[in-house]
Image: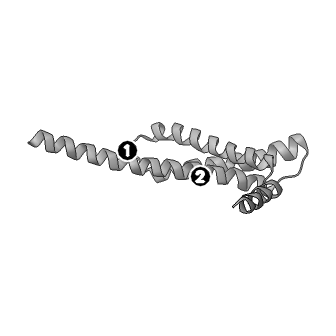
């Protein structure tokens, strides 16, 4: 087991850079903030997949903007597709969590409504 963990640690150390991790975290933050702003804006009765798509496209736009404008024009460094992918991957993970949370919330809401109706009728 220790050998397997050592191999995993070695692989992570050689393939995943700190910059990738920061882009991943930035993607999570961008998607979550977008989701939390867009949901009240569109209304809570809106299709949540629309809000998820909106959060993904904002995350994608932010990643491309950062690489194309800030890195290329301002800093003078090369654009990195890896950074864009890492940012979008973080955004996708945040969106998946929000979709799962909403699915669980709908289930709880349906259960609570049913219990209230049963108690009210009886």
> Of callouts 2 and 1, which one flags the residue occurring earlier in the amino acid sequence?
1
Residue 122 picture quarter = top left
**Neighbours of disc 1 within 10 Å: few (<14), some (14-19), many (20+):** few
In the image, what residue occupies the spot 40% across and 41% down?
44
Residue tagged 1: 45
Most foreground residue, 62 or 5: 5
Tell whether 112 sits left or right of 97.
left
- Mark in the foreground, 2 or 1: 2
In the picture as drawn, the residue positioned furthest to the front comes out as 2
Residue 58 spot, x, y in % from top left: 62, 47
Circle 1 sits in a helix, a strand or a loop, which is it?
loop
**Viewport quadrant of the N terminus:** bottom right
| Cα separation between marks 2 and 1 | 23 Å
Note whether residue 51 is visible.
no
Residue 71 spot, x, y in % from top left: 84, 45
Most foreground residue, 104 or 68: 104
Residue tagged 2: 93
Note whether residue 70 is visible.
yes
Residue 39 spot, x, y in % from top left: 47, 41
């Amino acid at each position: 087991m220790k050998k397997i963990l050592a191999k995993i640690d070695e692989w992570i150390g050689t393939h995943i850079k700190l910059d990738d991790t920061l882009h991943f975290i930035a993607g999570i933050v961008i998607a979550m903030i977008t989701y939390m702003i867009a949901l009240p804006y569109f209304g809570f009765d809106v299709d949540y997949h629309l809000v998820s798509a909106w959060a993904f496209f904002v995350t994608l736009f932010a990643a491309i903007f950062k690489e194309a404008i800030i890195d290329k024009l301002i800093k003078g460094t090369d654009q990195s597709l890896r950074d864009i992918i890492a940012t979008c991957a973080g955004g996708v993970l945040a969106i998946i969590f929000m979709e799962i949370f909403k699915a669980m919330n709908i289930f709880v809401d349906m259960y609570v409504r049913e219990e209230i109706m049963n108690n009210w009728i009886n």
